[in-house]
Structure formats: structure tokens, C-alpha cells
Image (spheres, rainbow, N blue to C red):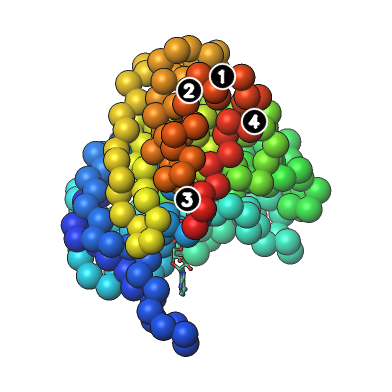
Amino acid sequence: MSIRVVCQGLSKTFVTRTGRVAALDPIKLDVAPGEFVVLIGASGCGKTTLLRIIGGLDTASSGTIGLAAGMPGRNGIGFVFQQPNLLPWMTVEQNVALPLRLAGMRRAERLDRARALCAMVGIGGFERRWPRELSGGMQQRAAIARALANDPALLLMDEPFGALDALTRARLNAELERIWMATGATVMLVTHSISEAVMLADRIVVMSPRPGRIREIVPVPFARPRPPAIEESGEFQAIAGRLRRLLAPEGLREVTTPALLTHMPADQRDATEGSA
Ligand SMILES: Nc1ncnc2c1ncn2[C@@H]1O[C@H](COP(=O)(O)OP(=O)(O)OP(=O)(O)O)[C@@H](O)[C@H]1O
Ligand SMILES: [Mg+2]
């Protein structure tokens, strides 16, 4: 199941002790049911704010969000944050089953489902462990399993792999694509990694800083599933280069040419932290 997400004139101003912070300028965005949209932009441009408002964790200052195909309620939305946020006093399967417990599902049934989810995200065999006994990547898989427990129509992911090493991250990208293809959920994912964005997205929403607004929406036409080797292709590199130029601060835009970047190690090419 999946839903369409329509943001119209969405803005957010935070009122703080020291004044007002304009975080989002009117945002207009239409995400199709089952689409995988990636948000990218400099630190502080409002990506988390936008995700939180869409997920109902915060309110907009103006504008509307339509979650078409019926408002799915809290159960219909799964959240994955940068940190796994597992409860340390619960086992992995209890953590994954928590949304089902809150929804009133019976114990045997919810633990069955939690185990199936653990297997799906690749941590089968670790269900009875404590979160602290799992590596960071495994904890993040558990967090994804928990977000999927209610079979959400919309999955919101805020830098879910930001804390992981590049190899684990690449593997989880591939698994996330597989899971997304299996569940058919609409996904909105925030990342600072250009290659992660191009690898995963149907469309990449590039945001500009202060107040955050949509600078450009870049489509990624590659067929699915996308093999890791696709990253070497000229088409992939062309899209990555375009994103890099869109994200570069004004002064850097001139020197950040694809020709120069091809001589740079891939991990350095990926640094997208802006000048916010
Ligand atoms: N609760 C809050 N109170 C006041 N200002 C806030 C609050 N939350 C966010 N902001 C401000 O809103 C702006 C957008 O913040 P947000 O966290 O959405 O950025 P982001 O794009 O997610 O950044 P990052 O990439 O670093 O996670 C920033 O200027 C931030 O300081
Ligand atoms: Mg953020």
C-alpha cells in the first residue's frame, strides 16, 4: 500500500527566544504513490523540518499537506531517524514489535511478525539479543524493521545511514531498494550523500538553504533493481555531477567541474555538507 503526498504552500517559521527562524519557504511538492523521493541540501536547509511536518511530528506555519488515498493516521507512517533509537531494555524483537503492541496486536502474533521483519532486513538470528549487542548497521536494520511493522503507506527516513561506514551503507542501500520494491510504500529519504541519492531515488529534490526552498527536482531514470556497478556509469556520474554543482556554494560552483572531480577519490567527491 502506498499514498500520494501533496505539499502546497508549506512554510515553517520557528519562533525562538532570540527571534524568528524562517526554516521553510513555501514548498510545493507532489510525491506519487509508491515513489522513492530523496531530499538533499545543505545542513540547516529544512530537510528534517519538512519530514517532521509531513509525518505529523510538527506543524506547518502555513500551507497544507494532503496524504491522498485517505489520511492513513499515525500507523500509516513509518519513521527512521539517523540514530536507531531502540529501547535498551527491550530485545530486538520486542523493539520491532513495539508498534504492533501499541496497536493492540496479541503477543504471539506480533512476535511472529517481528521475527519475519527481522529476517527481511537481514538480522534473522539476532531477535533475542539486546540492542547494544548489535553493530550500528544491525541496529539501523532493526529500526527499519520497526518502522515497517505497521506496514506503513509512507516511510519517512531522515539520514538513516548517515552514521554507517561506506560499505555497510552501500549494502543497506541495496536492501532498502529491495524492501521498498517488496512493500510498495511511498518513501521520502533525506541524505547528504550524492551517490546514495542517485542510487536510490526516482526523483531527487535539491533544496537551497535559508529559508529552505526547492531549488530543483532531478529525475533519475535508471531501471530497478539498480546494481552497485551502475555507479561507474557515465549517466550516473553525469547526474551526480549535476547535483554537485547544484549543491556547491556560489563561490565553489566554478571550480567544481566534473573533469576536476574525476581525479578526486570517490569519498571526497561525496562531501555535500554545505556552507549553512
Ligand atoms: N525546534 C526548533 N526551534 C528553532 N529553530 C529550529 C528548530 N528546528 C529547526 N530549526 C531551524 O530550522 C532550520 C532548518 O533545520 P532542519 O533541522 O530542518 O535542517 P536540516 O536540513 O535537517 O539540517 P541537517 O542536514 O543539518 O540535518 C535551521 O536553521 C534550524 O536552526
Ligand atoms: Mg536534519
Disc 2 residue type? Answer: Pro
**Residue holding disc 2:** 258
Please, what secondary structure does the residue beneath circle 2 have?
Answer: helix
Q: Is residue 188 visible?
A: no
Look at mark 4 in the image and give the residue it sits on.
267
Residue type at tag 4? Asp
Which numbered mark, 4 or 2, is in the foreground of this view? 2
Say if disc 3 is inside 8 Å of ligand 1: yes
Residue 28, percent from left and from top: 21, 52
Tell me whether circle 1 and circle 2 mark residues in contact (CB < 8 Å).
yes
Labels 3 and 4: the sequence-earlier one: 3
User: Residue, x 49% and y 40% (percent of image)?
Assistant: 252
Residue occupying the point 35% across, 26% down: 220
Relative to residue 48, is residue 84 drawn left or right? right
Under tag 4, what secondary structure? helix
Query: Would you identify the image quadrant in which residue 70 lies?
Result: bottom left
Q: How far apart are the two marked residues, 1 and 2, measured between alpha carbons?
A: 6 Å
Judge left or right: residue 272 versus residue 35.
Answer: right
Query: Would you name the residue on which mark 1 appears?
Result: 262
